[in-house]
Amino acid sequence: MLKPAELSLEEMGDLAAVIPAADPEVKVRYRAIPAFEETTRRAIIPVCEPTLSGNELKYVQQAVETNWISSAGSFIREFEARFAEACHTRYGIACANGTVALHLAIATLGLEPGDEVILPTFTMIATINAVTYCGATPVLVDNEPDYWQLDVEQVAAKITPRTKAIVPVHIYGHPVDMDPLMDLARQHGITVIEDAAESHGAEYKGRRTGGLGDAASFSFYGNKIITTGEGGMITTDNREIAQLAWNLRDHAFSSERHFWHKFVGFNYRMTNLQAAVGLAQVEQLESFVAARRRNAAEYTRRLRDIPGITTPPGAAWAKNVYWMYGILIDQEAYGMSRDELRRARSIGRPSAANVIRWPNGFAVTGSICRRPRRSRSARSSM
Ligand SMILES: Cc1ncc(COP(=O)(O)O)c(C=O)c1O
């Protein structure tokens, strides 16, 4: 039987102080979401909530009424094309979630045991898991303190003859400094797969994340900038990667004979119902991103003069989409540690870095997206 990995507090060492305590339990309540004007007075603002006020219901209804609910429906291709366009890429390959999008993208490289993939420590576990599923060895590097993103100098120091890929993660919606990273990768013949799960619509020197590396993966989980409930997408300009990913996504059925398989494939397909929601969501991407930027500007205006709080950095070459409005707390200057603040203001489903305290004692969490009037939003089922 599978045994869990257990570490004692002593074995965890310094990590014990860094890793936050368990999240509060989330109670799922089904209720109508009030219109935005009624919600502005809410004492609790969720960390994230989907906004389903566009064509979501209309498109899902079309899928249901026509019986096209599996992955063979036409919303899949429409969503893929529209999302790829939003990322300024040629191809989009829709998948069941962001983790399998990443796995699929890395799987196209045909890695072998002993091959190494460099990725940041500051990410979500899915990035490392996707590398591990491929039998390769994850090699971790830290992020730089200026913009909280992958440190390209540290990447350079970790490259070996076994390094086959680098996975930069545009953490919290701020892009990684991609030009030096791509130069480095090209010098060594290494493939770059962006983990853009958190950065829909973010820009690096005028180019969208998702189109900066050889391929990229996105997540459409309920807390992401656009959502399909569960879902993911690979974006790429590389025809070979795209065709392999489409093939591997669907059990690697051969085009020559139907029940003939040249690879070990997966079932990582997205359903037409999810793609129907996704198409409606991508139609609203620009307005969602604009709202996040407005909200972030307001948070920064209110927080920037509070001693001990560092608001999210923004590089001159970056257009952040603020998937998560994280702040840093200097315990001494602020008078409270991160964990004390978290306990004192434990509302909604805060994560370690995204609870902020307002001068008047009011607390909000960071990554909300202002909803339009009379929205038909649904609460995330995180
Ligand atoms: C950086 C990063 N990578 C990958 C994932 C995995 O996406 P999913 O939850 O859709 O599998 C997430 C999800 O939160 C993420 O934040």
Image (tube, rainbow, N blue to C red):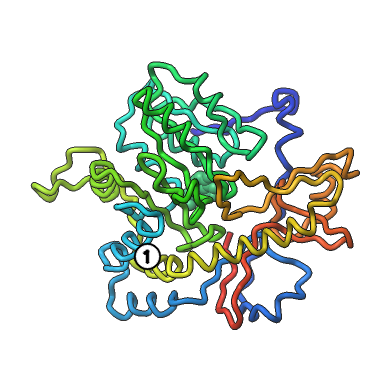
Residue type marked 1: Ala
Is residue 285 or residue 77 the one in the foreground? Answer: 285
Along the line of sight, which residue is nearer the eye, 109 or 380? 109
Q: Residue at x 85, y 53 (%)?
A: 344
Question: Which residue sits at x=49%, y=37%?
Answer: 168
- Where's the C terminus, which quadrant? bottom right
Q: Residue furthest top?
A: 161
- Few, some or many residues within 10 Å of mark 1 (<14, 14–19, 20+): many
The answer to whether 60 appears left or right of 52 in the picture is left
> In the shown orientation, is residue 206 left or right of residue 304?
left
Furthest residue to the bottom?
Answer: 374
Q: Position of residue 294 (x, y in %)?
A: 65, 64
Circle 1 SS class: helix
Asked if residue 228 is positioned above or below residue 149 in the image, the reply reads below
Quadrant location of residue 116? top left
* Rendered location of residue 72, percent (x, y): 25, 64
The answer to whether the residue bearing label 1 lies less than 8 angstroms from the nearest atom of ligand 1 is no
Residue identified by numbered label 1 = 275
358 vs 297, nearest the viewer: 297
Image coords of residue 292 (percent x, y): 61, 62
* 275 to the left or right of 204: left
- Tell me if residue 316 comes above or below residue 180 in the rendering: below
Residue at 38 percent across and 70 percent down: it is 276
The residue closer to the viewer here, 120 or 6, is 120
Q: Residue at x 31, y 68 (%)?
A: 75
List x then y, in percent, for residue 196: 48, 47
